[in-house]
Amino acid sequence: MFRIITLSLVLFAVGCSHPLEIAGVGDIRSSTTNNDCALEDQPCANYVVGDYHVTYVADPRPGWVFIGWEGCGEQFPQCSLDVPAGIVRQFAGKAVPPLRAVFTPSTVEPEITVATDWSPSAATLTVEVTFTDFLPGRVQLFPLGLSGDWVEEDSEAPFVFTLDVTQIAPGMHTLRVVADDGVEAISDTATIAVSGCNGRHDLCARRYDDVRYATTHNAMSNAANGWIGPNQSWDVPTQLAMGVRGLMLDTYRAGDLNLLGLVQVPGVDPDSTYLCHSVCALGKQPLADGLAEIRTFLEQNPGAVVTLILESYISHALTAAAFDAAGLTPYAYAHSGGAWPTLGEMVEGGSRLVVLQDVAVNPAYPWLMNVWTHAFETHFSAAVPEDFSCADNRGAPGNDLFIFNHFLTEVFGSPALAEQVNHNPLLQDRVVECELFHGAKANFVTVDFVDIGDALITIDTLN
């Protein structure tokens, strides 16, 4: 207790107190968040130590509006203070006059509504602010909240702001709107999602074939869902959430025979389709259910571009039916030749899913593309690291897309084997070596147990 009291006295000795008070019903928000004052807590002591650089915004509660500051000169609707530490020390141990936010009841309940529109090709985020029961003469937008110096202002309706989205990191952000008519002011925040193309703004301008994608071998075969001898630890939704953008999946028909001569999935409609790895008894998931997980991810991540590489043992019609049942077909992209689109163009066009499979093309399903028409690969049968080679296997070198297989093969998946090869410098050095060998980017860097080692960070670094 003595140490706590002593510390408090030291702080008071080098700083001063600038109390915050509220008249009416509202709160005081600050750019530091450390200087906030809630209605229930006021008057707030607000001790100041060091530089006193802060912007205050008055936040009226429903049924109230803000009408001004007492103790902040003529500033309205914000109160900004920039007092150097030297002056703060001159008032050490003293309480300066309080800053008071004054609110008054309103006969209406004004509301602020924020709508956003992201353009990946233009690298802009358009923010439109509308009002109910309030006619502002000025609207100020703080794209990154009060903590930064970025402020946009508009004094004429419609209140539309065009922001350089590259200045806002992809993710969830809280922006603040402050509006006033010269006499009264209202304020509110909005949570906005700022998307990048596969998590980065710079990738939006890159062609699909000019980007690398972390890819999981036998993605459906995972320990989280209890598969026997899995190739991955994470389930597919987790793989996608962690940054995987290429999924190798195997599709089977329930009524067909497995390697042991037994029906893959007995007791169901033989035309039912499943994700399995050779023998469905070792692990399975209805194909439509697995595809629905991918559709959910695409819905929740509007900047994501995902590729499926299917080892298919079912017909085009059964594959398409599962995609339809999962609601995934509208996302599928059909490449008609020529240059691939940029990721930004794919996002804007709504076709953010590339589906490649190892069976001949059926013209009725142009989005079910043949993988070896568009891609080539390195060998996938390495037993030890020394077996790795840049030599091509299936597909013609010179095809647009490069599948870079980087995993060791046993009967079942093995975290121990992944530990041998998923770390740098081996992984990154080998990617660079084979890219130089083929004169092409390793678009799909394919690994077992993507949670082990450096695959995700390596892809981000190389991109």
Image (cartoon, rainbow, N blue to C red):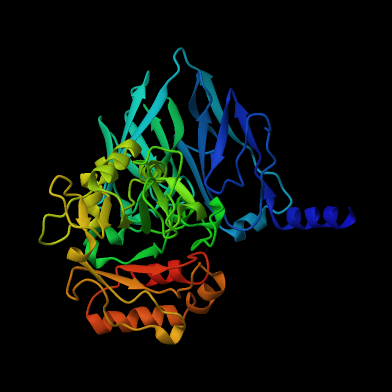
Instruction: Using the rendered image of the protein, determine whether residue 121 is visible from the camera's viewpoint.
Output: no
The residue nearer to you, when weighing 230 against 346, is 230
On screen, residue 194 versus residue 361, left or right, reads right
**In this figure, what is the number of numbered marks?**
0
The percent position of residue 92, horizontal first and vertical second, equals 71, 54
Instruction: Using the rendered image of the protein, determine whether residue 432 is visible from the camera's viewpoint.
Output: yes
The percent position of residue 106, horizontal first and vertical second, equals 48, 16
Q: Which quadrant of the structure image shows residue 37? A: top right
Q: Is residue 346 above or below residue 114?
A: below
The percent position of residue 274, horizontal first and vertical second, equals 40, 47
The residue nearer to you, when weighing 105 against 159, is 159
Q: Residue at x 36, y 20 (%)?
A: 132
Most extreme residue toward the front, as rendered? 261
Q: Residue at x 61, y 61 (%)?
A: 86
Quadrant of the drawing holding the C terminus: bottom left
The residue nearer to you, when weighing 18 against 29, is 29
On screen, residue 316 versus residue 42, left or right, reads left
The residue nearer to you, when weighing 198 against 18, is 198
Most extreme residue toward the right, as rendered? 2
Q: Which quadrant of the structure image shows residue 403? A: bottom left
The percent position of residue 149, horizontal first and vertical second, equals 42, 52
Q: Residue at x 48, y 73 (%)?
A: 410
Q: Is residue 401 above or below residue 366?
A: below
Q: Residue at x 13, y 62 (%)?
A: 339
Most extreme residue toward the bottom, as rendered? 386
Most extreme residue toward the top, as rendered? 107
